[in-house]
Amino acid sequence: MSYRILGTGSALPARAVTNDELSEFLDTSDEWISQRTGISERRLCTTETLDELALAASRAALEAAGVTADQLDLIVCSTTSGDHLMPAEACAIAELLGATCPAFDVSAACAGFVFALDVADGYFARGRAERVLVVSAEKVSRLVDWSDRATCVLFGDGAAAAVLGAGGENPLAVRLTTEPTVEVLHVPGVPGTSPYDMTERPEPHLAMEGRRVFKFGVNAIVTSVTELCAEVGVSVSDVDHFVFHQANERILSSAVSRLGIDDARVTRALAETGNISSACIPLALDRLARSGQLERGQLVALVGFGAGLDTGACLLRW
């Protein structure tokens, strides 16, 4: 048994922070950030909690799907920056929705949404679910070092969700891979205060090797799209919409050039949101769905890539 997407939703913090605002306390400028990343502003939490953003995105997706919380059989949330180390962010979402189904998190960084879709697909395949809520919720602003202009300018906060229903033909193809490399992109864990712990305790801030991430991201998109299409037996030009992880405009542009695809078919939200980790893909998908550009029967390719180094990609029929 496969699934179909019944509805999508998303939520962003109210506060938009421009590049010019960042230049007030960082050695940077709007020109420097825009040319290197394609980002003009990002949404950052001020008074909102991640629980609240996840709830708003979930409610929007449920409303679009015509599904109520008590009808859900499972909630899966992808996050690396939840409001709680425990319980799972998904448990907080379930409580706020009033749902009583199983709920747990998936941690696969920026590829998390596609990994979560694959987890949900397993429940459908075993006949253990009829309706599943998949949420991606990220508050990356809590992870970055705000004195590091190379990383803090890239990220934002937000949440997005999709309600899946049993039936249909999705996914047409799935590609999940890991090239196990920790140091390229990572956030150290909470150091704790144990008097017996003699290990090194680095600051829990995001660290990234930009050039290696760039190369990995471009290759991840190109390889994933090519292999997904080959598996299904369609041409890359047959895909109607491409929804890639919104890491950096240069990554997107390079991948588009190498694939030789029509840039108009690539959905973007990066300029207004920045990189919101696993929430990038479902947020862009929600915008695409609500714009009226998605038509029944169209092919949609999703590709996420990030820390791990993980890649999650799938080809869907809308």
Image: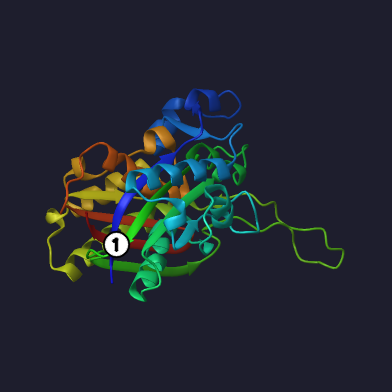
Task: Give the image quarter of residue 86.
Answer: bottom right
Which residue sits furthest right? 195
Task: Report the front residue among 289 and 246.
Answer: 289
Q: In which quarter of the image is the C terminus?
A: bottom left
Task: Report the front residue among 125 and 188.
Answer: 125
Is 199 positioned to the left or the right of 233 in the image? Answer: right
Is 34 positioned to the left or the right of 288 in the image? Answer: right
Residue name at image x 37 percent, y 56 percent: 304
In this figure, which colouring scheme has been used for the structure? rainbow
How many numbered badges does the structure rendering display? 1
Give the vertical position of 129 relative to 189 (above or below): below
Q: Where is residue 260 in the image (x, y as percent from the top left)?
A: 16, 51
Q: Label 1: which residue?
A: 314
**In terms of secondary structure, where does tag 1 sit?**
strand
Is 147 positioned to the left or the right of 62 in the image? Answer: right
Is 32 positioned to the left or the right of 147 in the image? Answer: left
Q: Where is residue 262 in the image (x, y as percent from the top left)?
A: 16, 45
Residue name at image x 36 percent, y 74 percent: 127
The local crowd at label 1, few if under 14, some if 14 to 19, many if 20 or more residues have their Cα within 10 Å, is: many
Which residue sits furthest bottom? 126
Task: Report the front residue among 232 and 24.
Answer: 232
Give the vertical position of 283 relative to 87 (above or below): above
Task: Report the front residue among 34 and 229.
Answer: 229
Q: Looking at the picture, which amino acid does disc 1 mark?
A: Cys
